[in-house]
Image: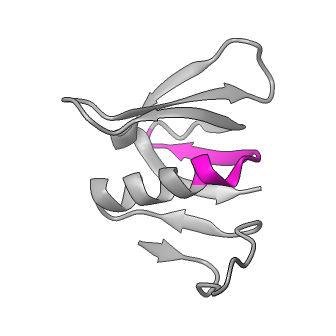
Amino acid sequence: MTDTKSHMENGGSLEGRVFRPASIAETAEAIERAFDYRGDVTLELSSGERIVGYIYNRQMGGPQPALEMFPADSQTPKKIPYQMVVSVSFT
């Protein structure tokens, strides 16, 4: 997984970091960090769409792992398959 900032030890902030996962396992790791972050993140999707919002749930098991988020510009939650996530930015 490409990370634009060096890894921080001892609980350093994720704010400002961008993860570009190279596999579904790395995507799951980045999404898990975003879920634990408890703040807004920006997702870049394979469609080119960018979504800013709060990840409130993730489903790593099953045939199609997905996350659920509240977009900052909408009151309607979105479900996004992990395979569509190109990058996760901690904004």
List x then y, in percent, for residue 43: 59, 45
Whether residue 42 is in magenta: the answer is yes
Q: Is residue 89 above or below residue 45?
A: below
List x then y, in percent, for residue 27: 39, 55
49 and 83: which is toward the camera: 83
32 and 15: which is toward the camera: 32
Q: Is residue 61 above or below residue 16?
A: above
List x then y, in percent, for residue 32: 49, 52
List x then y, in percent, for residue 77: 63, 17
Whether residue 36 is in magenta: the answer is yes
The residue at 46%/29% (across/down) is 80
Q: Residue furthest top?
A: 76
Q: Is residue 52 above or below residue 63?
A: below
Residue 63 falls in which quadrant of the image?
top left
Which corner quadrant holds the C terminus?
bottom right
Residue 25 falls in which quadrant of the image?
bottom left
The boundaries of the magenta stretch are 34-46
Q: Is residue 37 left or right of residue 34?
A: right
The residue at 76%/66% (across/down) is 15
Q: How is the image coloured?
A: one colour
The residue at 26%/35% (across/down) is 61
Q: Is residue 67 left or right of residue 75?
A: left
Q: Is residue 58 left or right of residue 33?
A: left
Q: Residue furthest left?
A: 63
Q: Is residue 77 left or right of residue 71?
A: left
How many circles with numbers are drawn on the protein? 0
Which corner quadrant holds the N terminus?
bottom left
